[in-house]
Amino acid sequence: MLKKVDSSQLKVGMYIHDLSCDWMTHPFVRNRFVIATHDEIAKIIKAGIHDVVIDSEKGLDVDAPTLAEAQAETERELAVLAQQPARIARTSLGEELQRAAQIRHQAAGVVRNVMADARLGKAIEIGAVQPVVQNITESILRNPGALLGLLRIKTKDDYTFLHSVSVCALLVAFCNARGMDADTVRQAGIGGLLHDTGKAMVPDAILNKPGPLTDEEFAIIKRHPEDGWNILRQSPEVPAIALDITRHHHERRDGTGYPDKQSGDEISELAQMAAIVDVYDALTADRVYHKGIPAAAALRKIYEWSKHHFNQQLVQEFMRCVGIYPVGTLVLLESGRLGVVVEPHETNLLAPKVNVFFNTKTKVYIKPETLDLSRGLGFGGGDKIVGYETPSKWNVDPMRFMTLA
């Protein structure tokens, strides 16, 4: 039986099923193992991992809630959060997708050039970065779901570049949702686009290693925020907010982050926001050493981790910004149909608009149609989300059905 266990309850002989953290947080070569020594327990606690999932059938048991019980409690809390207002797009998803695709391509090219210049020791040309951030901002204002949905599609080869574009777009959307002024949004967007510049100093063999990192390799990876900060501060045009985001996007509120071990409100608000969106995007992407998880699952993990690692209020605001079920999420409906989320509802994040296209009972495609889950049967709705799904489970591509035109 899978149980959610506080790290203080760990004992030698327990079987770790999930360390319940993002890969850059823990120092272990695998996520599943039997605890063999007290030193391993100490390493878990030192890494800032506050709770884990154990399998009581493969190791020692302990009195703790089951994983299902813990997840049900999270869903109850999210149901309350879902009743908060959301921001509605100004243009339709279909109208914005083509423009968003061009912006995605342009922005990835700029990040690629920035990384190349950094490797060669050249100064960063901020003049090439600012127009990209402006284009991203305008796309987010028209319809955030278009660009954010497209940016969920990454290959292992272009991850480094598109991750930076995603963090920029997510951070811009987050800032806008919180009503920040245009100049702050601009500086934050630059910070998001440039936040991983220091990875240019990490050897490709380490950055793209398909297996677990050694302690030495892990230490090299953890230098990238400071390396990026040192590179960017050589260009006087890089704004202060962008420098702060670059250096501190891996800090955590409990002091277990890096490079400066900042804690609580020592970490600036925008760096805390950047930390949330950085982890969110990293969790959802396929990488050489990590299979991406659905966006809805990533949000739930971040929500749980916000008890220690992130600002809980900011996490809740981020979830209202992107939706409990973000645009592009594959969802299973009560009727047994699969649909892709295309637009959040303005007052109920559990009842978005979805394009349904597949029947899981008969395992066949059906005529696609748009459902507004906030409406009743006969009024374009009459169904309910049961949960999110992984596209590979059903061998479907939900992105094909983002628009029905």
Image (cartoon, rainbow, N blue to C red):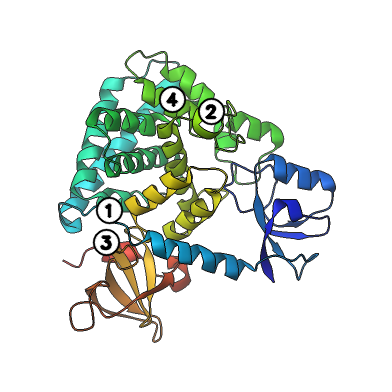
Residue 250, image x, y percentages: 53, 35
18 w.r.t. 212: above or below: below
Question: Helix, strand or loop at disc 3?
Answer: loop
Tag 2: amino acid = His
Q: Nearer the viewer, mark 2 or mark 3?
A: 3
Question: Helix, strand or loop at disc 1?
Answer: helix
Circle nearer the N terminus (4, 3): 4
Q: How far is mark 2 from mark 4, CA to CA?
A: 13 Å
Tag 4: amino acid = Asp
Which disc number belongs to residue 347? Answer: 3
Are there few (<14), some (14-19), or many (20+) residues within 10 Å of tag 4? some
Residue 282, image x, y percentages: 48, 46
Residue 96, image x, y percentages: 18, 51
Q: Residue at x 37, y 52 (%)?
A: 152
**Which residue matches tag 1?**
145
Which quadrant would the N terminus be assigned to in this image? Answer: bottom right
**Which residue matches tag 2?**
224
Q: Nearer the viewer, residue 204 or 223?
A: 223
Q: Nearer the viewer, mark 3 or mark 1?
A: 3
Tag 1: amino acid = Gly
Tag 3: amino acid = Thr
Marks 3 and 1 close (CB-CB < 8 Å): no
Q: Residue at x 38, y 15 (%)?
A: 123
